[in-house]
Every structure is written in structure tokens, then in C-alpha cells.
Image (cartoon, coloured by chain):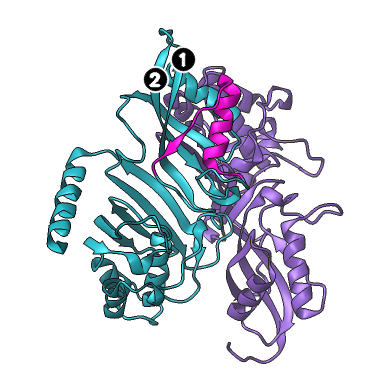
Chain colours: A purple, B cyan
Amino acid sequence: MERRDTRDTRFRLTIEYDGTDFVGWQLQTNGRSVQGIVEDALQHLFGQVVRVHGAGRTDAGVHADGQVAHFDLRTHLDAETIARALNAQLPEDVSIRHAEEVDAEFHARFSASSRAYVYRIAQERVSLERRTHWIVYAPLDHDHIREAVTRMHGTHDFVAFSKFSPKQTHHYCHVFSVVWEEGERVSSFHIRANRFLQGMVRCIVGGLIQVGRGRLTPGRFAEILSARDRSEAPMLAPPHGLTLTDVRYDPDERAVVSAIMRELASASR
Amino acid sequence: MERRDTRDTRFRLTIEYDGTDFVGWQLQTNGRSVQGIVEDALQHLFGQVVRVHGAGRTDAGVHADGQVAHFDLRTHLDAETIARALNAQLPEDVSIRHAEEVDAEFHARFSASSRAYVYRIAQERVSLERRTHWIVYAPLDHDHIREAVTRMHGTHDFVAFSKFSPKQTHHYCHVFSVVWEEGERVSSFHIRANRFLQGMVRCIVGGLIQVGRGRLTPGRFAEILSARDRSEAPMLAPPHGLTLTDVRYDPDERAVVSAIMRELASASR
């Protein structure tokens, strides 16, 4: 443990959690949230209310092994000691993987340039991995899925693939990378974008599985996306297949997204 | 579904299970066993008591993704149909991965030439994989562990690394392969042997972690093994890190083991 002067410090956490028994990341009046559990642990350790800000608001049942959050604390303890103390306090379905001091300007959510998710699908019955995989028994046409996946590269209005949210001013997301990884027993969908709308990855995966089962052509999938009509949205894939794996804070990514959003704004004027 | 004549058939199953909520493979008067759950499902489906014989008697909390079992049934159904029907009946922590018809001479336990286990160790706190990994926080000397592992190749009397069992006539096991796989976040111990004594892998791993933590030298580890004294046995590693991954029925492996056992018997005469 490194001794320091007592001072106001912003700490950044990397957090893993098994979402099975959570109502989601975000604090709610009813139910066990990850944010609430981490805030409770901090309050227990430091005797004060500490607000924790997360980068991604994962839904109930969604997991994370790379969620990022920050909080402010007046303390003489260093980040590593705080991580250890938190882990000793937290239930076993939440782990602090890393903690570090950051500048006061850092904001887990607003400074983030991109988030990455993986959605895991088992193509036969699994027991050991049942909590992190959606079991899909039907044979899948992986070529068709890959074709649909390719259409999502770049900037799109994803309103058709999201839950209704009155807070959104627009629904453009820039997809930095998107990959369908085909496996014999397990396949997975990887996506990194500057931001995600509520239910977006689960809705995309729901659509991709329809494509894989031959119930939707890759072309129709692309049409649903570009029609921007939520009534055409595919059914959501279940939450337990989804894991938030990484959050980036990359100035280059931010610059790319800012330029694209400026262009969209001037085009719509 | 393939239609066949109704006849007595022996079926071989490959079974996966999450051992968390089981008292082990073997049927017990109290508690939920994997064997009991599969027998219940067969009884429910076919209206008769069907005895299921497993290849490896995994302890409470130990997992499997390659357990093998057999049973006899007078039926016109083919193996694939039976697997599907069983899966529809089984709870989600047990899965039939494969089923096939076998000769009446096949015995899941007595025909097996070797079993393979993996023991998984997380070197930092994990939440998503906490049910299949033993978390060991102490830094490990992987070179020392590898040195101890190397000493286990070949045929040894493993009595010092087993629980007492009055049924054993001898404690020789032939280790076909044994590997320590070092990773940054997760390491794993892989072992294939003709047979395993009760608690053997967990006891070996308990010892290896002592070696890794510097509490036992690789030489002392080898001495404990060769001293054949159970009072020197290391503490058992917890069951949830252990998974039975494979059972082989290989005539060449059987021939090797038979030759070794004959030699040991003649040497002790």
C-alpha cells in the first residue's frame, strides 16, 4: 500500500460481472443493480455516499468483463488498495479487474469513444456455459449471416433496432467493427461502435439469427435497418448471451465520430 | 427419426454437466446425482427402470463435458431420437452431447482405456467463470510447477495423492500425458491416465499450488508421491475447478497399461 496525502481523486475501475442476478448496471429503486452494489461497497468502506458513473448501461441479465466506471473520493489510499478493498467487500458475481487514478476531466461515459460487445450463441445444448450463451438449435446459414453483418459497417440510423427511448435526440451510431465468428459448437457476434441504443445488440442478433434460419434474407435485413421503422424490428435475442467486453477512450476514434456527426448535421440542415 | 425393429440395444452417451448443484455422478440415497437425474429421465420416457453406468465417478461439485455412460434398452428408437428426448427431459445443468448404439460388450467404465481431466485456476478474481475456476491470488512460480508436473509422467503409485478407499487392491496409475498450461489470467492442469483414484486430481493440484507458492519444492513434491504415505498428502484443491473432459476406448492404450501392470505384478512376486 502506497501512502499518499489525503486529497480528492478520480478513480477509474474496470469491472467484470455475471449479470444473471442483476436488474442491470443502473441503480434502480427496486432490485439489485451493479452500480448499486459497487456504491454500497464504497459506502461501507469509506462511510460516505459515493456516486459511481458507468460507461455502458447494460440491461438486466447482460454480463460485462470490461465495464468501465469512475468515482471521486477524498482519500490517502492508492488505486490498487482500493481495488483490493472493494473486491473483499463485493459479492462473488462482481469483480474489480483494475483500478487507476485518472484526471478530473475523465468521465467513464462521456469520455468514451467506443464500446465493444460480444454476443455468444451455442449451436447445440450446453450446460456449463448456459449462463453466457443463447442456445439456438436450428442450423444456421453462416454465409447469409456474414452478408447481413457486412451491411452494418459504418454509420447508420439504428432506430429500427432499438427500444423506444424518449431521451434520444438522434439514432445514428458509427460501427467501427463488426464480425461474425463462426464456430462448430459456438458462434459469436462482435461489434464495436461509438455508442449503442437500448436493446440494439440484442435486436441485431435477433435479426441475424432470423437471417441464419432463412426467415429473413440479408437484403431484407439491410432494408429493415435503412427503413428506420421500429415496427419492423426483429425480436430481441435474450440478454444472457450478451457481454460488454471493452470501452475505449481513444482521441482518434472521437475525431472520426465528431467529423461524421458534423457532416450528418450539415446534410440535414 | 429412423424406424427400426424393437430390440435390446446398448446405447453410449456423451454427457456434459455443471456439477455445482450435484452430489456427484454416482447415485446416492440422499441428494441429486447426475446418474440419478439421467436414470429418472429414462424412466419417465420409457416407463421402466434403466440403469446407467458412467465411466468416471466425479465427486460433488466436479463438472464434465465428456463423461461417457451406457445403458441397455429394448426400443425401436434410434440413438439420435433418444438423445433429443432425453435433452427435452433433463434439467438445464445436464446435456446429452451425443448418443450412439454400441456392441453389447461395450462397458462405459470397464472398457475405458483412459480418462482426461482439466483443472482450471484463475490467477485473479473472476466472476463470470467463478463456477469452473479455483481463484488463487498468490503469485505462482510456473517453472517450479512445470518441474513437479514432469515428475508425474509414467506409472506411479498414487496412494499419497488419494482419499482412503478400502476397495482399491492397488494404487498404480499410468499417466499418459500431463501438462501445465500457463496463462496470464488463467492457468490449467491437464492430465490423462488409465484411471484415477478418488480425490487424486484435486490432491495433485493442491500440491502443485503449494509448489507454485514456494511452500513445497518440486523435489519434495516428487518425494511425497514416491513415499506412498497418505499422511503427507497436500490439501485437496476445491472441486469446482475440475472438469472431466474425455474418456477414451483405445485398444493401444489398453495394451500399454496391461503390459505395465503385468510387469508390476511379476516384479512384486
Task: Assess whether residue B167 is covered by the magenta stretch.
Answer: no
**Would you say B247 lies left or right of A166 here?**
left
Q: Is residue A120 visible?
A: no
The amino acid marked with disc number 1 is Thr
The reply to whether callout 1 and callout 2 are in contact (CB within 8 Å) is: yes
Q: Position of residue A94 (x, y in %)?
A: 64, 61
Secondary structure state at the residue bearing disc 1: strand
Q: Position of residue A249 (x, y in %)?
A: 57, 61
B122 is higher (above) or lower (below) than A169 = below
Q: Position of residue A39 (x, y in %)?
A: 76, 67
Tell me where the magenta segment starts and ends, as one range.
B32-55
Question: As rendered, which of A147 and B140 lies closer to the eye?
Answer: B140
The amino acid marked with disc number 2 is Thr
**Would you say A100 lies left or right of B157 here?**
right
Question: As rendered, which of A130 and A146 lies closer to the eye?
Answer: A130
Chain identifier of the residue bearing label 2 in the image = B
Task: Assess whether residue B39 is covered by the magenta stretch.
Answer: yes
Q: Position of residue B125 (x, y in %)?
A: 55, 66
Please report whichever mark, 1 or 2, sits nearer to the chain's N-terminal start: 2
Q: Identify the residue position indicated by label 2 in the image.
A: B9
Q: What residue is rendered at 42% in x and 30% in y? A: B98
Q: Is residue A50 visible?
A: yes
Q: Identify the residue position indicated by label 1 in the image.
A: B75
Secondary structure state at the residue bearing disc 2: strand
Asked which quadrant contains residue A42, the reply is bottom right
